[in-house]
Image: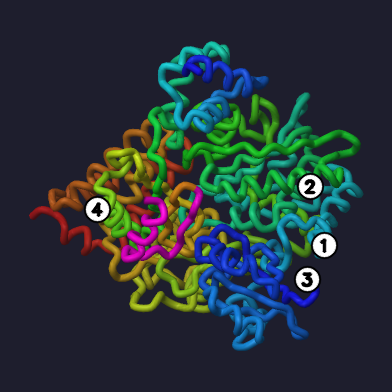
């Protein structure tokens, strides 16, 4: 199925009254993995709004992506409890180990490294989220073992 | 299997992150174990915690490893739950069920007093419900601390074809997790509060705006809504009251009520100018009550126990209990529900257990990333709205994060301003531009290129942001930065260029 047809199909599935831009973009991302920028005109047409409005929402929300993420997404929590418990060190160890920077994907597309502002896991911080798996009280020395499960 | 021993293990996200999931996996095939997954008691420093029944009540094992199963089954070395000081010294009302019940067991919820508030709400008139709230002196628990009855009265009296009840589950303040615990651990308590609100203001539809970072919470709440619907609870005076969970997409400012409403409508989460307030014109321009999860969770007991009961707890301007969430370098991080009025020092000593091993106290931050910092000399402040307001601080959503001697206060201040610069919605100039300039100045100081004028500039910038920002993000962002400079001036000066 071409990208255009796939987008059209999803747009038909999530049509609502009143139209909801954020829900639509999240649904597209859920099924495609990201929101293709070239689909913006189709999305705008389907929601009876302008391409500017869609692009505005797309660029506003940190969780909406316009490119595919790596196979595994690693997010290091940067909240205050994690900060107090050394998330900075943890992030540096991950950057070194994966040889990639925040917001980037490793060559080969295996891991995307990112940060998050709070996982609500403050009582067992510092926190690393890999896909849907939340790890608490993570020590820099445990990073390699943790990554091994996804390599 | 009848010979199996019932063991209780939390299914809370933080308990799982601490290793509860590993235990469940390791013991899944053991016929001698019947594992019951509960909410967490909130004593997270003890998680994963495993409990079993005894004639004297539950007995617990702390920080359990899979190999500890034999001693648990033999009953060796457990501690009675009621003799854990962290829990025994709390006054639990909103969090009374935590660690006791299965989150989706509606019968257990009801057996422990659940739905009594809703029954009472149906006996009362809408005015009667609001009067009970007025007597209770409940103030919103999300951070703004506005009198709840007042907001409900406005929404009730505003004429409209549709009215909405919106639970704000966008718990974005770093250092807070009590809403997540409620959503995951006692979801019917939230739904009951929303239903009572709907009955009082005449609303026809409810939404829970849940942050994307809480997938387990959203899933639990959806399951609870299905159960409540099957039990025909989502019905007010013969009219359906559907409740929908809507997930956000990672924007902090969407926890601000008007940005939340924009986001719920599917738009950019940009703050609206107030007035009109959401209680007058909120979602799709209709009267809308937006309240924090904890606020709704407090409502049911105010109705079942009475407003005067609630007003009998706490201090003059701060009635009831507060859910404090301890984090950072404290020895015992976890959830603490106590009446308002204890000092910060009492909370940190009695519940926090002092500092984590190897750490010395440097500062404590109350109220999330926009909250003020307190040095050791500021710890006698009583935890209540008025004392904090007088000190130029906020309680926010009750997050308490302790920083130790290794913390670089200049870098911490930079971290705060960078957070605001990232999260500013861009609507008002003081926040949009001010936060970026503030971050640049702090980066300059951190890199050794700052001057004494830069400190003065941060002061000016901070005052402008405080006075002229449209919402609390810009208005509060200067507080942690300016209190860091105020209490740790030597650290800032030592990094300045001569």
Nearer mark to the viewer, of 3 and 1: 3
Q: Looking at this view, is A64 or B442 the one in front? A: A64
Please say whether residue B304 is visible from this viewpoint: no
From mark 4 to mark 1, how far is it between C-alphas?
Answer: 53 Å
Q: Is residue A138 magenta?
A: yes
Location of residue A24 in the rendering, given as x and y in whole percent from the top left corner: 56, 25
Look at the picture and state if B398 lies above or below B345.
above
At x 41% / y 61%, what residue is drawn? A126
From mark 4 to mark 2, how far is it between C-alphas?
Answer: 47 Å
Asked whether disc 3 touches disc 1, contact meaning CB atoms under 8 Å apart, the reply is no
Label 1: which residue? B113
From mark 3 to mark 1, how far is it between C-alphas?
Answer: 31 Å
Q: Earlier in the sequence, mark 3 or mark 1?
A: 3
Where are the magenta residues, as a range?
Answer: A132-151
Q: Secondary structure at mark 4?
A: helix
Nearer mark to the viewer, of 4 and 3: 3
At x 43% / y 65%, what residue is drawn? A137
Nearer mark to the viewer, of 4 and 1: 4
Label 4: which residue? A96
Location of residue B459 in the rendering, given as x and y in whole percent from the top left corner: 29, 48
Location of residue A47 in the rendering, given as x and y in whole percent from the top left corner: 57, 16
Label 3: which residue? B1
Looking at the picture, do discs 2 and 1 lie on one chain?
yes
From mark 2 to mark 3, how far is it between C-alphas?
Answer: 27 Å
């Amino acid at each position: 199925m071409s990208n255009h047809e796939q987008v059209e199909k999803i747009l038909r599935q999530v049509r609502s009254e009143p139209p909801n831009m954020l829900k639509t973009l999240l649904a597209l991302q859920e099924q495609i993995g990201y929101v293709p920028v070239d689909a913006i005109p189709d999305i705008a047409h389907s929601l009876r709004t302008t391409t500017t409005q869609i692009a505005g929402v797309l660029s506003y929300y940190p969780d909406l992506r316009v490119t595919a993420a790596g196979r595994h997404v690693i997010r290091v929590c940067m909240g205050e409890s994690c900060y107090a418990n050394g998330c900075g060190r943890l992030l540096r160890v991950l950057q070194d180990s994966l040889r990639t920077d925040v917001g980037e994907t490793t060559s080969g597309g295996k891991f995307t490294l990112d940060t998050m502002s709070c996982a609500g896991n403050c009582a067992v911080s510092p926190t690393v989220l890999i896909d849907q798996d939340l790890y608490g009280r993570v020590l820099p020395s445990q990073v390699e073992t943790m990554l091994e499960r996804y390599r | 299997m009848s010979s199996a021993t019932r063991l209780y293990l939390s299914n809370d996200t933080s308990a799982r992150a601490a290793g509860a999931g590993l235990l469940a996996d390791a013991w899944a095939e053991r016929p001698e174990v019947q594992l019951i997954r509960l909410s967490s008691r909130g004593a997270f420093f003890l998680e994963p915690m495993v409990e079993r029944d005894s004639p004297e009540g539950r007995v617990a094992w702390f920080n359990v490893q899979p190999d500890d199963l034999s001693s648990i089954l033999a009953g060796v070395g457990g501690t009675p739950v009621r003799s854990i000081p962290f829990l025994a010294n709390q006054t639990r009302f909103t969090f009374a069920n935590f660690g006791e019940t299965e989150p989706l067991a509606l019968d257990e919820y009801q057996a422990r007093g659940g739905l009594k508030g809703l029954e009472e709400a149906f006996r009362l008139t809408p005015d009667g419900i609001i009067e009970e709230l007025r007597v209770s002196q409940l103030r919103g628990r999300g951070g703004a601390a506005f009198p709840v009855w007042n907001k409900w009265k406005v929404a009730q009296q505003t004429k409209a074809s549709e009215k909405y009840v919106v639970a704000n589950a966008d718990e974005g303040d770093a250092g807070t997790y009590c809403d997540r615990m409620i959503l995951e651990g006692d979801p019917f308590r939230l739904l009951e509060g929303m239903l009572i609100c709907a009955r009082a203001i005449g609303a026809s539809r409810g939404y829970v705006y849940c942050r994307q970072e809480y997938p387990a919470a959203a899933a639990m709440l959806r399951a609870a809504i299905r159960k409540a619907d099957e039990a025909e609870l989502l019905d007010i005076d013969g009219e359906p009251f559907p409740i929908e969970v809507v997930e956000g997409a990672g924007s902090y400012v969407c926890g601000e009520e008007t940005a939340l409403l924009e986001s719920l409508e599917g738009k950019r989460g940009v703050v609206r100018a107030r007035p009109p307030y959401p209680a007058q014109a909120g979602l799709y321009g209709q009267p809308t009550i937006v309240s924090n999860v904890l606020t709704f969770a407090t409502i049911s007991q105010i109705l079942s126990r009475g407003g005067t009961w609630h007003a009998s707890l706490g201090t003059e301007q701060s009635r009831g209990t507060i859910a404090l969430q301890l984090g950072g370098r404290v020895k015992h991080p976890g959830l603490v529900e106590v009446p308002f009025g204890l000092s910060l020092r009492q909370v940190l000593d009695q519940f926090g257990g002092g500092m984590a091993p190897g750490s010395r106290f440097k500062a404590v931050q109350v109220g999330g990333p926009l909250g003020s910092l307190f040095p050791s000399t500021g710890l006698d402040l009583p935890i209540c709205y008025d004392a904090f307001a007088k000190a130029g601080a906020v309680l926010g959503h009750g997050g308490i994060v302790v920083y130790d001697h290794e913390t670089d206060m200049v870098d911490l201040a930079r971290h705060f301003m960078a957070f605001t610069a990232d999260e500013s919605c861009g609507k008002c100039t003081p926040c949009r531009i001010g936060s970026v300039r503030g971050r640049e100045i702090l980066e300059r100081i951190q890199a050794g290129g700052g001057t004494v004028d830069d400190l003065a500039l941060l002061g000016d910038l901070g005052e402008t942001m405080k006075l002229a920002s449209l919402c609390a993000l810009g208005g509060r962002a200067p507080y942690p930065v300016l209190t860091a400079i105020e209490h740790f001036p030597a650290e800032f000066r030592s990094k300045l260029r001569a």
